[in-house]
Image (cartoon, helix red, strand yellow):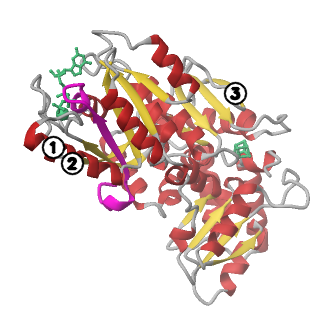
């Protein structure tokens, strides 16, 4: 991600008077000595830029500035340079010393407001003083985001991180690409959509519809097939598609029917990138190998729906994970906007694709898990992992695949996985589907039923 061009990074600038702790806050946020800190007022002279990956926001450019209250001839030049930074600031952090709000702060806040730049007010050095209560009340009325910190003690840094996420402009958060960028203009994707009894009547579900629209917006096109027709459809094409995307419920069959050199993934994994943070959730999936008997795993769904039959979150994922790990895991479930305050006891959070949510909300959950030191992954990634086709499902995402391969080469799992049954099913499917013998292909269908893979999307009335 360090190769992300500067122009595509969210520009986050720190403003404030000299010595209020702008550089100290930036260092605390980045956990690096990006900017020099000293008790001498006017330490930062020219703007200091630091490109980095700020979890869970993505690629950002931090800009530390010289104090806006600098004096003298040189000071005036520094102030001028700081003012120039205002022009390119997409998100401002206005730092004041707790208890020392004055004209300088009011003026720069006014300027940021005029520019409609989202701003977070930070009262730093709360170890030494408290911000004025009346002022806090006024800011609350104005719905200004305020965070209290002590950069020296590391207090409030998580809250600042959350505030950055909350204040980031929607068009940065809601990255538009679902799969159009993976396919490209003039190219084709094949979408595999099982129409079974759990599919909503008379329509497609949201991730499928959004994928089709995204392909059209990208001047690409698609072929939509049920899993049974996939092989024949692929045979008819003059050239292979750029990508095959399947509902997770058909993962094994689709993997067996899709030539190995055609990239394959699932709608749910696309959602991890679109609505969440694919790298973070791939990292989270690695925790599956560490699950042991008695561990608590939280399964969270963004929609509140009545579980039906073989519900994906309540029945299928727990079953596959139990088979895969061989451990008696303690599964807990949450739906809608409920999410535990205390996450620390969970060994893993498995989240639905969050197709009905905006990305900010999902990123907020990922951040909360990260702050609690709890890995978080999603349904599609969990399914691919426990079916032993994780690497293949990550093939369209080179950065995520490389991350996973590097992580795996460092960690040798304590147990042999994936579970034998799933491996046998996959092997049976691969062999039988490659055969022209109708009986063998029928057996492959039976094996597919055995695997009982499904997805949250077809158990919920996504709109
Ligand atoms: N007590 C206390 N001191 C702090 C805190 N944050 C920063 N400082 C100290 O305040 C002084 C100034 O910190 P800097 O981070 O250099 O402040 P700055 O706003 O970047 O200053 P300039 O670059 O000069 O504009 C240093 O001595 C820091 O150690 C805090 O939360 N509490
Ligand atoms: S439809 Fe399924 S994946 Fe989408 S938000 Fe609802 S529960 Fe999550
Ligand atoms: Mg500084």
Ligand 2 under 8 Å from disc 3 Cβ = no
Q: Is residue 23 a member of the stretch shown in magenta? A: yes
Query: Is residue 190 toward the left or the right of residue 206 in the image?
Result: left
Residue indicated by mark 1: 76
Whether pointer 1 and pointer 3 mark residues with C-beta atoms closer than 8 Å, the reply is: no
Q: Is residue 77 left or right of residue 274?
A: left
Which is nearer the N-term, disc 3 or disc 2?
Answer: 2
Residue 402 showing in the rendered view: yes
Instruction: Name the residue located 37 percent from the left edge and 10 percent from the top edge.
Output: 130
The quadrant of the image that shows the N terminus is: bottom left
Q: Nearer the viewer, mark 1 or mark 3?
A: 1
Q: Which residue is mark 3?
A: 334
Q: How crowded is the residue under tag 3: few (<14 C-alpha within 10 Å), some, or many (20+)? A: some
SS for callout 3: strand
Residue 224 tag number? none
Instruction: List the single residue furthest toward the right.
Output: 201
| Residue 458, position as x, y percentages in the image | 78, 50
Mark closer to the chain start, 1 or 3: 1
- Is the C-beta separation of discs 1 and 2 under 8 Å? yes
Image quadrant of residue 92?
top left
Residue 376: x, y in percent?
Answer: 52, 35
What crowding class fits label 1: few (fewer than 14 Cα within 10 Å), some (14-19), or many (20 or more)?
A: some
Q: In the depicted view, which residue is nearer to us: 257 or 147? A: 147
Query: Which stretch appears magenta?
Result: 1-24
Closer to the eye: label 3 or 2: 2
Q: Which residue is mark 2?
A: 80
How far apart, in angstroms, are the residues tagged by discs 3 and 2?
52 Å
Give the x, y percent position of residue 103: 33, 28
* Label 2 SS: helix
* 3D distance between C-alphas at marks 1 and 2: 6 Å
């Amino acid at each position: 991600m360090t190769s992300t061009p500067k122009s595509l990074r969210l520009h986050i600038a720190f403003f404030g008077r000299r010595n209020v702790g702008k550089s100290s806050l930036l260092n605390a946020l980045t956990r690096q000595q990006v900017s020099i800190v000293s008790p001498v007022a006017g330490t930062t002279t020219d703007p200091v830029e630091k490109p980095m990956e700020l979890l869970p926001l993505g690629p950002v450019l931090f800009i530390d500035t010289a104090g806006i209250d600098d004096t003298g001839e040189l000071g005036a030049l520094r102030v001028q340079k700081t003012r120039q930074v205002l022009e390119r600031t997409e998100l401002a952090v206005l730092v004041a010393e707790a208890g020392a709000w004055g004209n300088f702060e009011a003026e720069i806040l006014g300027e940021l407001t005029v520019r409609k730049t989202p701003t977070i007010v930070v009262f730093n050095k709360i170890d030494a003083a408290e911000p004025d209560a009346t002022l806090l009340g006024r800011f609350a009325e104005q719905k200004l985001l305020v965070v209290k910190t002590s950069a020296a003690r590391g207090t409030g840094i998580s809250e600042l991180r959350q505030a950055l996420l909350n204040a980031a402009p929607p068009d940065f958060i809601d990255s538009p690409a679902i799969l159009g960028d993976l396919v490209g203009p003039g190219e084709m994707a094949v979408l595999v959509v099982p129409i079974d009894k759990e599919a909503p009547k008379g329509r497609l579900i949201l991730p499928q519809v959004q994928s089709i629209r995204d392909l059209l917006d990208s001047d690409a096109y698609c072929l939509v097939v049920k899993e049974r027709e996939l092989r024949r459809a692929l045979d008819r094409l003059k050239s292979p598609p750029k990508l095959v995307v399947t509902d997770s419920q058909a993962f094994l069959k689709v993997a067996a029917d899709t030539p190995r050199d055609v990239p394959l993934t699932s709608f749910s994994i696309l959602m991890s990138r679109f609505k969440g943070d694919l790298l973070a959730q791939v990292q989270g999936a690695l925790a599956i190998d560490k699950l042991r008997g008695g561990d608590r795993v939280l399964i969270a769904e963004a929609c509140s729906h009545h579980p039906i039959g073989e519900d994906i979150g309540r029945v299928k994922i727990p079953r596959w994970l139990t088979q895969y790990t061989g451990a008696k895991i303690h599964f807990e479930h949450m739906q809608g906007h409920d999410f535990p305050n205390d996450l620390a006891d969970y060994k893993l959070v498995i989240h639905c694709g969050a197709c009905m949510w905006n990305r900010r909300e999902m990123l907020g959950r990922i951040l909360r898990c990260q702050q609690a030191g709890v890995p978080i992954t999603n349904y599609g990634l969990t399914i691919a992992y426990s079916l032993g086709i994780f690497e293949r499902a990550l093939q369209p995402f080179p950065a995520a695949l490389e991350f996973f391969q590097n992580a795996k080469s460092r960690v040798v799992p304590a147990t042999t996985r994936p579970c034998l049954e799933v491996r046998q099913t996959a092997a049976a499917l691969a062999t039988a589907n490659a055969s022209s013998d109708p009986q063998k292909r029928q057996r492959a269908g039976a094996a597919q039923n055995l695997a009982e893979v499904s997805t949250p999307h077809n158990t919920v009335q996504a709109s």
